[in-house]
Image: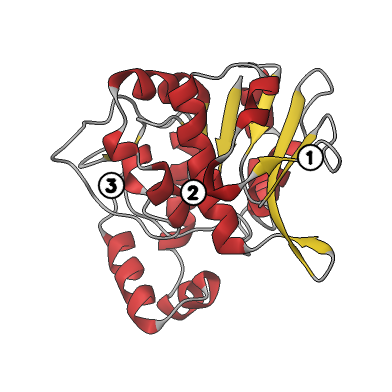
Amino acid sequence: MRIIISPAKKMNMETDSLPHESLPQFLDEAELLLKCLKSMAYEQLKKLWGCSDSLARLNFERLQCMDLRQSLTPALLAYEGIQYRYMAPGIFEYQHLDYIKAHLRILSGFYGLLLPFDGVTPYRLEMQAGLAGDGYRNLYEFWGDKLARQLAGETDLLINLASKEYSKIISSYLPEKVHLLTCSFAEWKEERLIEKGTLCKMARGEMVRFLAERQITESEEIKDFDRQGYAYSDEYSKPDHFVFIR
């Protein structure tokens, strides 16, 4: 079993706690993307990133001296988004970390696919960003089926806790032998189920922690998730889509 999650926009450098254990397996591809980004002017990058002047300047300065092999932070600790805060990897116990190392994979527009303790450096490049280069019109074309093939070689069960923006780079190419199980988190509003972005990110983080604490390896065990007020809905779920309602 493997669990896939999205990255976060906000990142930090943390080289004083746990060290990174490996370099990303698609580092050559990341080097190509870095070269492409470095060839772009500031205004082009700001438009690509779709962010404020202060964030654009920060990331532009990072690009100028970016080194993908030095002063790295474990990916699990580098991302600071809501999902990661609720996952709270900084307080995992040793058995939880062992589980995460074996089962968790982080999707990335820049690095492709990350192991939790792959060393990364802060970057800004979302999967849906309109980055075009030699032979590709966007990052979905750049990565193609590489990430799905890698995961298919590792497992026949994928637990999808990633956003649609990221998960489609996997679902579009995954062979039939691999079962992709998506988990959704919803609530009732005006007689219909809706998913709220922030609450979903919180729940995804809690789900990762739940899986690690329970050492879950079978899909049926996921139905016991009951955090943040959620409960599994047999009525609205399908074999490839578990729905949790609060």
The amino acid beneath tag 3 is: Asp
* Sequence-earlier tag: 1 or 2: 2
Q: 85 above or below 89?
A: below
Looking at the picture, tell me which residue is in the foreground, 86 or 13. 86
**Residue drawn 68% across and 22% down?**
219
**Element type at mark 1:** loop
Closer to the eye: label 1 or 3: 1
Q: Which residue is identified by label 1?
A: 172
Q: Nearer the viewer, residue 13 or 121?
A: 13
Q: Which residue is mark 3?
A: 67
For numbered disc 3, what is the local secondary structure? loop
Residue hosting label 2: 7
- The label nearer to you, 1 versus 2, is 2
- Identified at 49% across, 42% down, the residue is 206
* Badge 1 vs badge 3, beta-carbon distance below 8 Å: no
Is residue 234 toward the left or the right of residue 19 in the image?
right
Distance Cα–Cα, label 1 vs label 2: 19 Å
Q: Do we see residue 211 in this rendering?
A: yes
Tell me the crowding category of disc 1: few under 14, some 14 to 19, or many 20 or more residues within 10 angstroms, Cα based: few
Q: Position of residue 67 (x, y in %)?
A: 28, 47
Indicate the position of residue 166 as horizontal and vertical percent values.
64, 48
Looking at the rendered structure, the kind of residue marked 1 is Ser
Viewer-side residue, 102 vs 45: 102
Relative to 153, does residue 13 appear above or below in the rendering?
A: below
